[in-house]
Amino acid sequence: MLFKRIENLEKCAKEHGLIYLGCSDLDVTQDFVHFENWLAKKNYGDMAFLTLNQKVRKDPKKLLPGAQSAVLLAKNYKVPKPNRLLSIAPIASYAYYQDYHKILRQECLRFISACKRDGTLMADTDYRVTIDSAPLLERALARKGGRGFIGKNTLFISPRHGSFLLLASIILTEPLPANADHGYATEKSGLRHKDHGGCGSCRRCQIKCPTQALAQDYQLDVSRCLAYLTIENRGTIPTEYWKHLPRAFFGCDICQNVCPYNRETPVNEDWPRIIPERLKGVSTFEIAVMDQAAYEKWFAGTPLTRAKIFGLKRNALIVMYVTHDHRLSEALTLIKKAPEIHPVIRATVKQIEAYEVD
């Protein structure tokens, strides 16, 4: 009966285009200690929100009255040869699609409804779907599901599905068995999954990270990460990292692209990739000088709005400078003539002009 129930959960997930990562209890004590130690090193950049709601992060049961377990699901977001899809500098693969929070949540809700209809879940089970929407150690729960591990790049890696995964945790009031499958192994890419992690001696992600943000095993220095610097960072970007932005205009997938577990993973064919169509023919220059109307036309409803209009304009200016774009001077002139200039853009312009003089 137990195994049949797990089989039904996995079957239902597959029918709804989702990857089943297992069930888990809600004890993340061990992972929370690791998280606290990471916070103590203050390697989280300007993301001070990570220091909030610690009681909830430590005890996920506080997210839902009566919570007892979690079902872990994922959606693959890999795209085919992303560098060839855009004329501008590369963006993170997840940003090619519509904002994933809403569409993945809808898929999870349909999954829950189907499981209740067929009796896999009890009809009166209460639940909460979380997709980057709660102070939850999602990768910790995914690891406890037994179908993968947290790698040296600090991402959750499934030996069968790679790391290009959007994680969804469904907190339930119904107790479900933790179907840990730590014993399975994979010969894929010559790596073997182990209880403590499946990276073994591999250090590709650490070696290839251009900013050494992964210098320590299983530790991320956010302040050096190109994904943080180009998306979450609300200030200027330190000039020492500018040379890397032509490879990472919005976000960075380098540590995933070099991971052996991602060599053979399929691309997401379920969700339409809307960014290539939106930005067809749009240049870095146009993004650097765009107004609010252009910003909404090109980026509304996409993950790129996470960087805000000034963040995208900042990134575009830096890419233009590094690549010696012949329209850089024109862009600077237009920006300085604008009635209002965001402080970050003003500071970035000053940085560029200081370099130009030097």
Image (tube, rainbow, N blue to C red):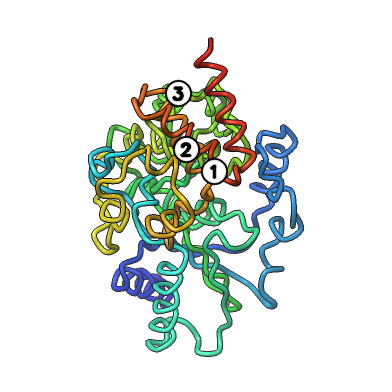
Residue in the image at 49% along x and 65% along y: 23
Q: Mark 1 Cα within 10 Å, few/some/many (few <14, many 20+)?
A: few
Q: Seen from this angle, which residue lies furthest top? A: 358
Q: Secondary structure at mark 1?
A: loop
Closer to us: 57 or 105:
105
Q: Secondary structure at mark 3?
A: loop
Query: What's the mark number on residue 338?
Result: 1
Residue pointed to by mark 3: 210
In the image, residue 111 sits, relative to residue 291, either above or below, namely below
Amino acid at dot 2: Leu
Query: What's the mark number on residue 41?
Result: none
| Foreground disc of the pair 3, 1 | 1
Closer to us: 243 or 327:
327
On screen, residue 337 versus residue 30, left or right, reads: left
Which sits earlier in the primary sequence, circle 2 or circle 3? 3
Q: Are marks 2 and 3 in contact (CB under 8 Å)?
A: no
Q: Are marks 3 and 1 in contact (CB under 8 Å)?
A: no
- The image position of residue 304, as x and y in percent, is 45, 51
Residue in the image at 57% along x and 77% along y: 127
- The image position of residue 66, as x and y in percent, is 68, 77
Query: What's the mark number on residue 334?
Result: 2
Closer to us: 312 or 140:
312
What separation in Å lies between label 2 and label 3 (alpha carbons)?
A: 32 Å
Q: Mark 3 Cα within 10 Å, few/some/many (few <14, many 20+)?
A: some
Residue in the image at 48% along x and 32% along y: 333
